[in-house]
Structure formats: C-alpha cells, structure tokens
Image (tube, rainbow, N blue to C red):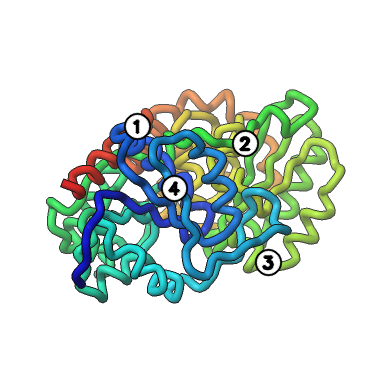
C-alpha cells in the first residue's frame, strides 16, 4: 500500500494491561535516545490512557492517541484490567492511521495480523512478553514482523529452530526488568512480618488452586506469623467465578492482601515485595527469582515432575506433596535457600537473559535500525 512515510514510531497498547510493562520501558529508552523523534502511543481504553499519560509527561515527543473503538471506562479503578474493544476490528480501523508510520512496535501476536495479511511498507517489531514463555514461538504471524525481540538466547534459538531467519531475531534481555512504575509495597501491611506471595496458575491441569488453594490461604493466616499476598493470575477468576466471593471473605482480616484486578498484579510489584514465593507452575516465579529468594512449590496434583521440563522451575525450592507439609516447608525455606541460590541465578539467566535494566536500550536501537 502506498503512502507518504513520516519519521515517527507507533507503539500499540491495545491489549491487556499485563502487556504494558513489557512495552513501555522501550518507549522511555527510545525517547531518551532520540528526544526529537515523534512517538505515538495508541491506546484502547481510558485505563491505558490514564497510566501512560501520567508516566510520559515531559518525555520527549510522546503523544497518546485513542484507537478506533476506544472505550472510556470512568468506573474503573486506575490500573484495573479493563474490558477491551474487539481487537481485530480495532486493528483494521486503525490501519489508515498507521500507513504513514515507518515503524510500529507491539507486544502481542494479534497486531501482527496487519503485516501478515496486507502488503504494508510499515515495519512491525514484535517484542515477546512473559517470563520463560511457552507461547507458540514459530507462529507464522510472527514471521510477518520485521524484527522479533526476545529476552534470552534460548528464545532466539527456539525461533530459529522453528524456521525463523536468524537476522530477524534480536536478543535484548528482559524489558520488564526495567519497568519503574510499580506500586509501593510498604503500604500493604501494618506489621513487618515476612511476606509470602501465593500465585496459583489459572489452568486447572497446572494449578494448585482447585485442590488446595483455599486451604493454603487459611493455613497461612491461621499460623499468624506471616503476611500473605494472594495474587493469582488474572485469568483464574474467569475459570473460578466464585473466587471473588472468596476474596471478599478475606476483607478486613489481618495479614492478608488479596488482589484479582489491579495493575500491581502485572507490574512486578508483588514479586518485588515478597520474601517467599509460594506457587505451582506460574511463570511469575521467574520474575521473582530475578532477585534470588526462598521458594516453595505445591504439588497438589501429584505430578511426576522430576524429569518433566514443564516443572523445571521446581528445582528452585522445596516441593510440598501434602498440605500438612506446607507450614514446615515455609518455615524451613529461608534456612535451605542458600542451596537453591545458584540454581535460581542460572534459571533466570537462561529464561530471561540480561535483567540488569539494559534491555529497553537494546530494543530502542532495533527500532532506530528499522527507521534507518
């Protein structure tokens, strides 16, 4: 499709709020590298707009623009995961606005329908999201992008093994590690007790929630020596609608902070605040281990996990096979942690690559290369 190209870059914030920390640090790095470069942030809801507007004030030549189908959601608490307009109609209505844009950056596969189905001159750059992701790495839509940015060499090799051209895949390190706009953890609890983060997975065949979850929460609170953050994957409540009633029943109880919706669930606030990670197979543990700390894993389903790569993260801490072993394992975890520290460090290096904060600058250089 023909059109006059204006030197600018567009970032697509059209998906779930969990994508924002994987994308916004690149905006900051690009604005720092090229302060006069026009950068457009396309948003799908007022929740996205409010967050990005506050952070980007005074940041280079950044403009926030409302995508077609934009939803104003005045009743939503700032940062809560909002209902999104339909993605494909939004994308195709947005297309005329993107035709004069040389480079578009996104963090999800849906946006790649545009370069995959249309002969566009615009170069799309896709950055992987997720920690130790198990997504369909070789999906044909990904190959329609000009470049794919991945955190670690393991991801790059997986894409190449799946048929991608090596020059298309750029290893940057983990972009989200540089996300700065987190919820302060100091306000969560009145008492300075050790903080446990419990993050059950949202899929029943991989999760501790269906068999053990409520009892895990009750046993920790009854013990009384720990503060508990209960922050499962946002999609768990889709599978367990009664979860909202369970969380409502925790309101007012000492030593527990329960969250099903807020931006703190996805921005790294809780993994940064915790002293001990308690979970099953959620990838949040990889982000948690960016700073090595004690872990305990719940084998509620009786998995034969030792040689199963899907449970590789369970080498980072003790594995509990019964509820009666839960509190003893939590108590012992800080003492046993030195024996797991090296494993955690190696696991993070393999899964996330560089987590020192330099990933957004490398990603910004890939964007500038696309402009050139």
- Disc 1 from disc 2: Cα separation: 24 Å
**Residue to which mark 4 is pinned:** 63
- Disc 1 from disc 4: Cα separation: 15 Å
Q: Left or right? Give the position of 196 relative to 121.
A: right
- Disc 3 from disc 1: Cα separation: 43 Å
Q: Identify the image quadrant of residue 239.
A: bottom right
Q: Are marks 4 and 2 in contact (CB under 8 Å)?
A: no
- Badge 1 density bin: few <14, some 14–19, many ≥20, Cα 10 Å: some
Label whose residue precedes the other's in the sequence (1 or 4)? 1
**Residue to which mark 1 is pinned:** 32
- Badge 3 density bin: few <14, some 14–19, many ≥20, Cα 10 Å: few
Q: Nearer the viewer, mark 4 or mark 2?
A: 4
- Badge 2 density bin: few <14, some 14–19, many ≥20, Cα 10 Å: some
The disc at residue 82 is none
Q: What residue do we see at 39% from left, 36% from top?
A: 60
- Badge 4 density bin: few <14, some 14–19, many ≥20, Cα 10 Å: some
The disc at residue 240 is 3
């Amino acid at each position: 499709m023909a059109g006059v190209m204006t030197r600018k870059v567009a970032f697509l914030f059209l998906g779930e709020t969990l994508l924002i920390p994987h994308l916004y640090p690149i905006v900051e790095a690009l604005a720092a590298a090229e302060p006069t470069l026009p950068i457009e942030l396309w948003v799908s809801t007022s929740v996205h707009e409010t967050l990005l507007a506050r952070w980007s004030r005074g940041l280079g030549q950044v403009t926030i623009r409302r995508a077609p189908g934009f939803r104003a959601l005045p009743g939503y608490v700032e940062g809560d995961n909002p209902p999104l307009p339909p993605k494909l109609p939004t994308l195709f209505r947005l297309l005329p606005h993107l035709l004069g844009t040389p480079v578009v950056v996104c963090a999800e596969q849906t946006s790649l329908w545009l370069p995959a189905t249309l002969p566009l001159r615009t170069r799309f750059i896709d950055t992987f999201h997720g920690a130790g992701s198990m997504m369909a790495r070789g999906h044909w839509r990904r190959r329609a992008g000009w470049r794919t940015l991945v955190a670690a060499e393991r991801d790059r090799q997986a894409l190449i093994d799946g048929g991608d051209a090596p020059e298309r895949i750029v290893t940057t390190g983990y972009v989200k590690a540089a996300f700065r706009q987190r919820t302060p953890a100091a306000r969560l609890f009145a008492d300075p007790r050790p903080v446990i983060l419990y993050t059950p997975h949202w899929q029943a065949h991989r999760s501790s929630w269906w068999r053990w979850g409520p009892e895990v929460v009750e046993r920790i609170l009854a013990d009384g020596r720990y503060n508990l953050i209960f922050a499962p994957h946002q999609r768990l409540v889709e599978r367990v609608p009664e979860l909202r009633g369970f969380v409502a029943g925790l309101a007012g109880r000492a030593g527990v902070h329960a969250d099903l919706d807020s931006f703190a669930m996805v921005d790294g606030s809780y993994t940064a605040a915790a002293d001990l990670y308690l979970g099953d197979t959620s990838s949040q543990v990889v982000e948690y281990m960016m700073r090595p700390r004690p872990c305990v894993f719940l084998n509620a389903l009786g998995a034969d996990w030792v040689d199963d790569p899907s449970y590789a993260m369970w080498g980072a801490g003790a594995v509990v096979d019964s509820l009666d072993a839960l509190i003893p394992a939590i108590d012992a975890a800080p003492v046993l942690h030195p024996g797991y520290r090296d494993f955690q460090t190696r696991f993070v290096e393999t899964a996330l690559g560089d987590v020192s904060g330099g990933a957004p600058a490398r990603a910004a250089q890939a964007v500038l290369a696309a402009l050139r």
